Image: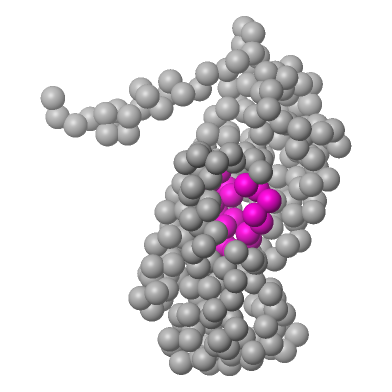
Amino acid sequence: MSLTYNKYLKIDELLALQQPLSKDPEHDEMLFIITHQVYELWFKQIIHELTDFQTALTQNNLPIALRNLKRVLHILKLLVAQMDIIETLSPVSFRAFRDRLESASGFQSTQFREIEFILGRRNPSVFAHYPQGLAARDRLESLLLQPSIWDSFLHCLNDSGYPMPPSALTRDLTKPPELNPAVQQQLIKIYKDESLLTQLCEQLIDLDEGLQEWRYRHIKMVERTIGNKIGTGGSMGVDYLYKTLHATLFPDLWAIRNAL
């Protein structure tokens, strides 16, 4: 038999993955499962695009890099819009099956941690949630030692005739980037030159802003669903999420706004 739509996309297997745990089951648990599974699928695509984006930067292929980043930005907008759907879940309907989740929590999303590590938001404390020997921990440990998006970006700028300080090119990859006045001087030159690199800088700002927007909508969704209660799986809930809201990915790109 020739290849069919169902076989190619493995539709039967895909539709068998939604398995509510509540008794009867609770009507809204299906929405909860599907929404989070869809998030994980889009996270997979974001990782795919960001990986290709970094490869394009190392090859100084700016058109491809811009294409990859544009796609990620569109996905982030879709993830924000998806909050409208999950917010139709009322506190009462969520409470009806929440206990069934036991220790399961979105805080445990390995793919989201991978995205954070790729983007440069690196906090080794997350390994407390991933015991030694897990494939997820191995992936995160590997990413912790690899250049982030920001590092690849700085090397691309350096190769494009905008010399970066050695301290920026050889920094500790396990830590998030810090403000660097010498980097900012080169970024200001790039903005004044108005090249494809300028567009890339602005798309990185869009990426940072888009992720902050998603974080904000996620916080408000959690807040309207469970208030200030302890999060699912014992996480700190809304209080913890608020602490992550304003952490920027690319501080030098924000710092130069006053000088442009």
The residue at 56%/86% (across/down) is 166
The residue at 74%/54% (across/down) is 244
Magenta stretch, main secondary structure, is helix
Magenta run includes residue 125: yes
- Viewer-side residue, 195 vs 160: 160
Q: Residue furthest left?
A: 1
On the image, which quarter does residue 218 sit in?
top right
For the C terminus, the quadrant is: bottom right
Magenta run includes residue 250: no
**Residue 224 visible to the viewer:** no
- Viewer-side residue, 212 vs 181: 181
Residue 57, percent across and down?
42, 73
- Viewer-side residue, 138 vs 244: 138
**43 above or below 151?**
above
For the N terminus, the quadrant is: top left
Display coloring: one colour
**119 above or below 93?**
below
Residue 221, percent across and down?
74, 39
**175 above or below 194?**
above
Q: Is residue 218 left or right of residue 243?
A: left
Q: Is residue 240 left or right of residue 42?
A: right
**Residue 186 visible to the viewer:** yes
Residue 132, percent across and down?
55, 41
Residue 8, percent across and down?
27, 34
Q: Is residue 65 left or right of residue 113?
A: left
Q: Residue furthest front?
A: 132
Magenta range:
109-127
The residue at 36%/27% (across/down) is 11
The residue at 48%/86% (across/down) is 158
